[in-house]
Image (spheres, coloured by chain):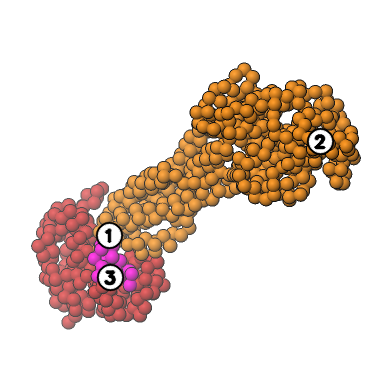
Amino acid sequence: MIGFILADLRRFKGGALAVVVLIALSLALSVTVTLQERALRLGSARAAEKFDLVVGAAGSETQLALSAVFLQPAPLPLMSGSVLADLASDPRVAFAAPVGFGDSASGHPVVGTTTALIEALSPKLAQGALFAHLGDAVVGSDVGMPIGGQIKPMHGDGESGGPVHTELAYTVRGRMAPTGTAWDRAILVPIRAVWQLHGMHGGGDDHDEDDDDHHPDDEGAQAGDATAAGPVAGAAQDKAPGLADAGGDRDHEGHAHHHHGHVDGNAPIDEHFDAQTPGIPAVLVKPRTIADAYKLRQHYRGDTTLAIFPAEVLTRLYATLGDARSLLLAIAIATQGIVLAAVLMVTIMHVGARQRQIGALRAFGAPRYSVVAIVWGELILLFLLGAVLGVALGYAAARLISGSVAARTAVHMPIEFAPQDLRLLLGFLLASMLISLLPALLALRHSPAQALRA
Amino acid sequence: MLALDIHDLTMRFDGLDAPVLAIDRLHVKAGSRVAVTGASGSGKSTLVHLLTGLERPKAGSIRWGGSDLGRLSTGRRDAFRARNIGLVMQDFHLFPGLSALENVLLPVRLGWRMTPDMRKRALALLDITGIARAGQPVETLSRGEMQRVAVARALLLKPSVIIADEPTASLDRRAGEDVSALLVRLAGEEGATLIVVTHDPALLTRLDRHIHLDGGRIVEDVRGEAAR
Ligand SMILES: Nc1ncnc2c1ncn2[C@@H]1O[C@H](COP(=O)(O)OP(=O)(O)O)[C@@H](O)[C@H]1O
Ligand SMILES: [Mg+2]
């Protein structure tokens, strides 16, 4: 029986192959949609799980979540720095890390923060050490810069080609272990360095007048300084009002810095924040307990601040995206239906064209059920091959998409099969089994006597 | 070995006024060798289809031994034919892509009646019919060889009856003579009743009863003259 089926399929290689490919492609479409949607959900859930609670200025919850989890460049409103000070001293908080966005280097986002966040993201660094001075940086695992390398931050996301900050170049001191999140592409620097680069100082005023006169400065200096490859720490010191002053800063734990648009990269970092802390777009918070998390969220939901669980916001976001998935899946399933119908038509024509052979089988002693089994078996074999090929193709396509997403955003989107996929596949096979019965039974309608006369 | 008894058989096709076949009475002794002749359209193939149970008569009875084919269901007629009748057709009906041996074994394989003995018998039959390589793909055989493979297939289950419809008509004279000799010899050795539709003189001389059809009726029934 199997031998006959295989011999028969060999004779109709081209047609059989076309049918298999058709089935495979239609199935691959559903497989890719299903896997990719799951990957998106799992991937962002994992990316979000490091950030239990995010507090930001009142505004869009979604934007806050996307910026904190995916480092999506977007102008976030600033909230008062005192929020950070309050959170840092709150007993319900394990750690509270400020994040300051806005700069980039070589296409990587430069994020100002504290060592606490780095320790949370990568409890053990893959290489090097945490930052200790304002001019130090720790890079994500996907940032291709060597330890000791220099980073010149640029204002903006890098694509719009904003002015280069010439006041400070960071030195890479450490590299995080891979986290599978967008933070793998980030360059993490001390938050105070970011503030100082942007002329924001303690004292409550978010944007003092320095901010206005430092940008024209930058632009004026850009032509000369951007190309200057000299030791940047030296350059920074040259620009500092006084060398002695800069050296003095290293020794005392002063909160207030008196540089105006110039940053001393050798100054030690200071991660204590008080009410005088400059404005910040967001604080990533690790509450001590789940109950604390809910209490904190409640507490910071107000007129001026916003508190979110990023995982929850993303889940809500995907719920709306779920409609798009349903649509895609419906299209994919409709495609399968069309393919099934096409295969059915081809098979019925094929069976019709082979009446003579099928009739002869019966005339020479093959029982009717074996004729049904042959036609049915041939089709099922094609469907099985198509299914295997389709799942493989769909899986490969999903992997490819995830790979390119990971390359662009560093967000790891895991391609995984789930038990319900098996149900879907079994459903498809069951449907194909039932549908294959039709041509198989049609094969019996032809009289073998007519077949022999033909 | 089965005897044939036909009573009041009529066969009509839709749209035709006159019956294609009308046989009041026909008896064929078990083990005899009968030729059926007649002009084209005289109903010979229709008779073959009725005798093999491929078609059911509109009226009358066709008995092989005790079984009346007209009263059996399609499935049972199929089973009866598979069990008792070896069939050889003008254009072979072999399955390309399979070897000579696989073609001989195909009906039993598809009927799940395959045994190791069956394979031995198939090889022996191919040997007797002069097919040197049992594993040769059937589409690469000569036409004469193809028909001999078909004869081996017809004989595999030691049928009581062998029915052939113009088995030599599409062969050249030499190949036709080989097949004729083989068919008659093997039917004799197996003790099968042989009914052959043919106009081939080489085959006719080997058969000992000639029935001539005209317009679906037996107009001549000559015994004992052949092979003498
Ligand atoms: N399915 C059918 N429907 C209508 N007429 C048929 C059918 N099969 C055969 N016939 C007619 O029956 C007659 C006998 O056919 P057949 O038995 O094949 O003749 P032979 O084999 O002697 O040449 C022919 O006239 C043929 O056209
Ligand atoms: Mg005929």
Q: What is the quadrant of residue B174 in the picture?
A: bottom left
Residue A340 point in image, percent of width and height = 42, 45
Q: Are marks 3 and 2 on the same chain?
A: no
Q: Quadrant of the C terminus of chain B?
A: bottom left
Circle 3 or circle 2, nearest the eye: 2
- Look at the numbered disc 1 and give the secondary structure of its residue: helix
Give the mark, 2 or 1, whose residue is nearer the N terminus: 2
**Nearest the camera: A123 or A325?**
A123
In the picture of the structure, the residue carrying the numbered disc 3 is: B153
> Cβ of disc 1 within 8 Å of ligand 1?
no
Chain letter corresponding to the colour orange: A
> Cβ of disc 2 within 8 Å of ligand 1?
no
**Nearest the camera: B99 or B148?**
B99
Q: Which residues are magenta?
A: B101-115
Q: Is residue B131 placed above or below A228 in the rendered structure?
A: below
The amino acid type of the residue labelled 1 equals Arg
Per the rendering, the colour in which chain B appears is: red
Protein chain holding label 1: A
Q: What is the quadrant of residue A239 in the picture?
A: top right
- Look at the numbered disc 3 and give the secondary structure of its residue: helix
